[in-house]
Amino acid sequence: MMSEPLPANSPATDWEQHWNLYAEATALNPANAFRRRTIFRILRVCGLKPGSTVLDVGCGSGDFLACINQYFTGVSLAGIDHSQTGLDVTGSKFPDAILKQVDLESDNPIPPGLRDWASHTVCSEVLEHLHDPVLALRNIGSCMEPGGVLVVTVPGGPKSAFDRTIGHLRHYNTENIRDDLEQAGYVVEQATGAGFPMFNLYRLVVLLRGDQLSKDICGTPSILSRFAMALFRVLLYLTLPYSPWGWQIVAVARKAEK
């Protein structure tokens, strides 16, 4: 897939700046809450249990790690991210996690302590930012034990002005996320849409808000933004977890056994 150039001076070109601007809005984002519920459901089905090792790829400001620590007991947690600022925010929320700064698009980027480490890996809303997602997926595989589970979420549907601002180079469908995973050497078990109709409705609101959304949610989100996000946190319970029409794309794959 061809990548689009990043907008000039976009926070996506400087992830240290990104988390300073949008960490609070990210924590309130109803789409993130929907994704976490979807991922947790998959992890349970895929045998997550005490003693499992879970890696969050692109852990950002640490909201997912904090939630998984709350809902799953007895698991070991690690997070990797390109942004040291994001890792610092994560460490302030969850100081016991293993946290490493990693560039997934470089050669041999994985720290030795994480090689073949994870029984369950989550890569949520990361690949759309990368120029070479297949290389990144191969590098992620270096962190996973043979037969380990990888849960991926990526955006589908049209790109909003805010998506472009934060550096979305592509949006996916079920066919091209499956292709990327297979090219990276994974065995794909599922690739599907999710979230119809309420997730799509939420995304339409984001699309209609246009360039103004970046201002609405920068720093402390506006009152209107907080109200809309709270409303959709409720509405997103009234949606189909899996549907071919959903604009959230979800895939489950395994690292090949040696």
Image (tube, rainbow, N blue to C red):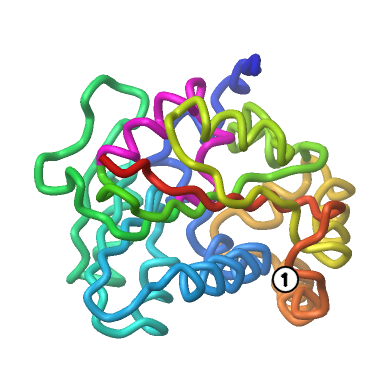
Residue 211 in the image: above or below residue 195? above
User: Quick one: quadrant of the N terminus?
Assistant: top right
Residue 163 in the image: above or below residue 40? above
Q: Quadrant of residue 88?
A: bottom left
Viewer-side residue, 163 vs 190: 190
* Image label count: 1
Report the residue marked by disc 1: 229
**Residue 64's spot in the image, x, y percent?**
44, 66
29 within the magenta span? no
Residue that appears at 47% across and 75% down: 44
User: Quick one: quadrant of the C terminus?
Assistant: top left
Amino acid type, callout 1: Met
**Residue 159's spot in the image, x, y percent?**
77, 37
Residue that appears at 53% across and 36% down: 127
Q: Residues within 10 Å of mark 1 (few under 14, many from 20)?
A: some
Looking at this view, name the residue that lies furthest to the left. Answer: 112
**Residue 73's spot in the image, x, y percent?**
30, 85
Viewer-side residue, 96 vs 115: 115
Q: Which residues are magenta?
A: 123-142
Residue 186 in the image: above or below residue 87? above
Q: Which secondary structure lies at badge 1? A: helix
